[in-house]
């Protein structure tokens, strides 16, 4: 039988860089009971041996690099010549060996100023600026950079951005942080609903840590992106205002990357949020994974 059909697979990470690892590829014919397995690596990314008696045909192609999550997509293979396919794979957090973070002085001016003003961060009391930033573990630092990047890129109707209204960090977690903010942020967020920048949502699942005694729920608001939304959940005590800020993946693994199966449960993993921001919103939190 003639061997004329070929599939060329380009495998990229969320930032658009080629993944050079040896990658397993599985092709499943969508009509016949026919499965083919191959391995590709770097420039050797063309799969031959596709029998032209079954082509043109629709295949489900699964791409599985060792350090990234497997993704899949449907590809209509041509009867002859080369069919091109690009697979973008998010990082597998369990395969990260280390993370290259930007230095404190490489952060935005607003980010540096916020860390410098924050001397009461839970478990890091007394540390500010570079000492606070460098004292964070990888998960907290990644979550912080994700939110700083997204908050600075999130506009309000008065032409400012969310980050500019955050006065002081009080607790950092991988999936969120709690901060003291100007009460004007709450008002500007509400005003931004009419411009379609935010919409009101339930904040029932958001609770303040014990250090914020006496604060009452004051509304929760979310940006309108399909994936990687910024959510601001406000709490008030008199004139004091604090906010729980987080980024929701909103099924981004399945819908943006077409991950075969999302195996992560519990708090949103900041490394996954990094790849969603980078791929879906072209927002770069500034750190890189070493695998």
Image (cartoon, helix red, strand yellow):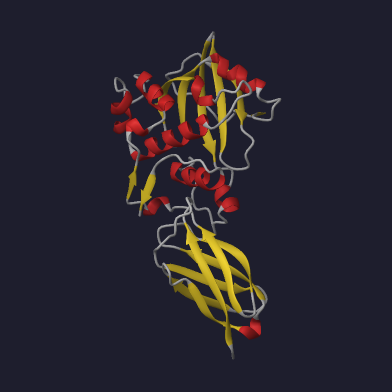
State the residue at coordinates (32%, 35%): 103
Tell which of 144 and 7 is nearer to you: 7
24 in relation to 125, above or below: below
151 to the left or right of 127: right
Q: Residue at x 32, y 22 (%)?
A: 128
215 in relation to 152, above or below: above
Q: Residue lying furthest right in this view?
A: 194
Rendered location of residue 1, percent (x, y): 59, 91
Up/down of 191 relative to 12, above or below = above
Q: Nearer the viewer, residue 166 or 153?
A: 153
* Residue 53 image offset from top left, x and y in percent: 65, 85
How many dots with numbers? Answer: 0
Name which quarter of the figure residue 259 lies in: bottom right
Residue lying at the far top of the rendered structure:
238
Q: Residue 7: where, in percent of width, then height? A: 55, 73
Q: Position of residue 70 (x, y in %)?
A: 49, 60
Q: Residue at x 54, y 25 (%)?
A: 162
Residue at (62, 80) in percent of width and height = 80
- Residue 52 lies in quadrant: bottom right
Q: Is residue 22 left or right of residue 56?
A: left
| Quadrant including the C terminus | bottom left
In the image, taking residue 262 as reference, residue 32 lies left or right, namely right
Q: Nearer the viewer, residue 225 or 113?
A: 113
Q: Is residue 174 left or right of 75 when viewed as pictured?
A: left
């Amino acid at each position: 039988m003639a061997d004329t059909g070929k599939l060329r697979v380009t495998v990229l990470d969320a930032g658009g860089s080629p993944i050079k690892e040896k990658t397993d590829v599985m092709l499943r014919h969508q009509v016949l009971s026919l499965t083919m397995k191959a391995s590709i690596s770097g420039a050797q990314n063309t799969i031959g041996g596709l029998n032209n008696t079954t082509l043109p045909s629709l295949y489900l192609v699964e791409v599985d690099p060792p350090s990234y999550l497997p993704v899949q997509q449907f590809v209509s293979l041509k009867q002859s010549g080369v069919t091109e396919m690009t697979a973008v794979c998010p990082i597998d957090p369990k395969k990260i060996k280390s993370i290259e973070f930007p230095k404190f002085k490489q952060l935005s001016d607003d980010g540096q100023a916020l860390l410098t003003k924050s001397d009461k961060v839970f478990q890091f009391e007394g540390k500010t600026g570079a000492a606070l930033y460098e004292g964070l573990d990888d998960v907290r630092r990644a979550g912080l950079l994700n939110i700083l990047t997204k908050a600075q890129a999130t506009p309000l109707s008065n032409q400012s951005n969310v980050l500019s209204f955050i006065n002081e960090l009080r607790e950092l977690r991988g999936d969120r942080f709690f901060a003291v903010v100007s009460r004007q942020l709450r008002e500007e967020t509400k005003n931004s609903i009419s411009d379609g920048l935010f919409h009101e949502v339930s904040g029932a699942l958001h609770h303040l840590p014990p250090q914020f005694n006496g604060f009452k729920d004051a509304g929760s608001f979310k940006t309108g992106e399909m994936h990687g939304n910024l959510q601001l959940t406000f709490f008030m005590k008199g004139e004091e205002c604090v906010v729980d800020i987080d980024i929701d993946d909103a099924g981004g693994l399945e819908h943006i990357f077409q991950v075969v199966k999302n195996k992560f449960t519990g708090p949103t993993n900041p490394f996954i949020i990094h790849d969603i921001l980078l791929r879906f919103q072209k927002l770069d939190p500034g750190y890189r994974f070493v695998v």
